[in-house]
């Protein structure tokens, strides 16, 4: 398949970067994955780092922005939990479509490769720390906003510590995602089950 747009190059390059270390992913390797010559890929991205950053922008920073997962937070915490899990499932589906599944010689899940990619982004993307901090902060703020609304409406206990409750939901997702990445990958049903348990502890 011959690539004919900048966005298609980013998609194909993502599949390369998640499975290879940044240093080993040569321009030639990236060009071949895109069905382009070296000159062809340089037309879109003069330097490998430019392409790597574009991939990280799309598949880390933009993918995890709340507005890219759902139009607006649901009215209740119970509904938002379902909405959040659906957003995670949609993101995982997109990743698997791009990097493949069940054909890995190292018996690693797509989730594992994604965490591998995140590590590379942290190492090689210039000035990435404040951008990652903003990404994490946006997610925590969203959970806190929904939890606060649930507290104000009487959906959950009036003595709920909003920030700690929001952190519990986020850390459950991040911790389970990381642990399961080393096995078969995150199971969204298990995530939903654990979210619902946290919710049961908070419910009024």
Image: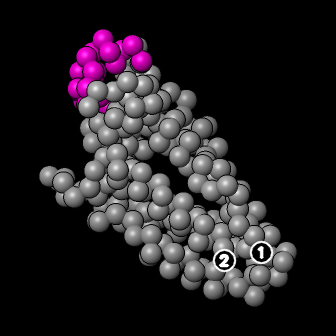
Q: Is residue 162 visible?
A: no
Q: Of residues 90 and 52, which is closer to you in this image? A: 90
Residue drawn 34% across the image and 18% down it: 41
Instruction: Indicate the position of residue 187 as horizontal and vertical percent values.
Output: 40, 70
Residue drawn 37% across the image and 24% down it: 4
Residue drawn 47% across the image and 36% down it: 56
Relative height, residue 181 to residue 49 (above, below): below
For disc 1, the neighbor class at 10 Å (few under 14, some 14 to 19, many from 20) is: many
Alpha carbons under labels 1 and 2: distance apart: 9 Å
Q: Give the residue pinned by disc 2.
A: 78
Relative height, residue 60 to residue 46 (above, below): below
Please state if 130 lies on the left or on the right of 73 as rendered: left
Which one is earlier in the sequence, the residue at label 1 or at label 2? 2
Locate the N terminus and report the quarter of the image it occupies: top left
Quarter-of-image position of residue 141: bottom right
Q: Is residue 138 visible?
A: yes
Quarter-of-image position of residue 77: bottom right
Instruction: Indicate the position of residue 183 as horizontal and vertical percent values.
Output: 28, 65
Q: Does residue 24 belong to the magenta stretch?
A: yes
* Residue 45: mark in rendering: none
Tell me how the rendering is colored.
one colour
- Magenta extent: 22-44
Instruction: Indicate the position of residue 176 as horizontal and vertical percent values.
Output: 44, 67
Determine the secondary structure under disc 2. helix
Relative height, residue 160 to residue 91 (above, below): below
Residue drawn 26% across the image and 55% down it: 101
Q: Give the residue pinned by disc 1.
A: 150
The overriding secondary structure of the stretch rendered in magenta is helix
């Amino acid at each position: 398949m011959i690539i004919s747009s900048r966005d298609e190059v980013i998609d194909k390059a993502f599949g390369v970067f998640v499975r290879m270390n940044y240093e080993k992913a040569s321009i030639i390797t990236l060009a071949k994955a895109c069905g382009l010559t070296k000159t062809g890929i340089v037309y879109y991205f003069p330097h490998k780092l430019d392409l790597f950053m574009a991939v990280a922008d799309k598949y880390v920073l933009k993918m995890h922005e709340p507005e890219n997962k759902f139009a607006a937070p649901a009215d209740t915490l119970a509904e938002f939990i379902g909405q959040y899990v659906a957003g995670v499932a949609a993101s995982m589906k997109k990743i698997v479509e791009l990097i493949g599944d069940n054909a890995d010689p190292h018996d690693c899940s797509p989730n594992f490769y994604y965490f591998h990619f995140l590590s590379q982004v942290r190492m090689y993307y210039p000035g990435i720390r404040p951008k990652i901090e903003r990404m994490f902060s946006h997610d925590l703020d969203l959970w806190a906003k929904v939890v606060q609304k649930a507290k104000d409406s009487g959906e959950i206990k009036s003595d709920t510590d909003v920030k700690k409750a929001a952190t519990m939901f986020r850390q459950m997702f991040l911790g389970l995602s990381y642990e399961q990445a080393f096995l078969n990958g995150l199971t969204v049903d298990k995530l939903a089950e654990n979210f619902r348990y946290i919710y049961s502890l908070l419910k009024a």
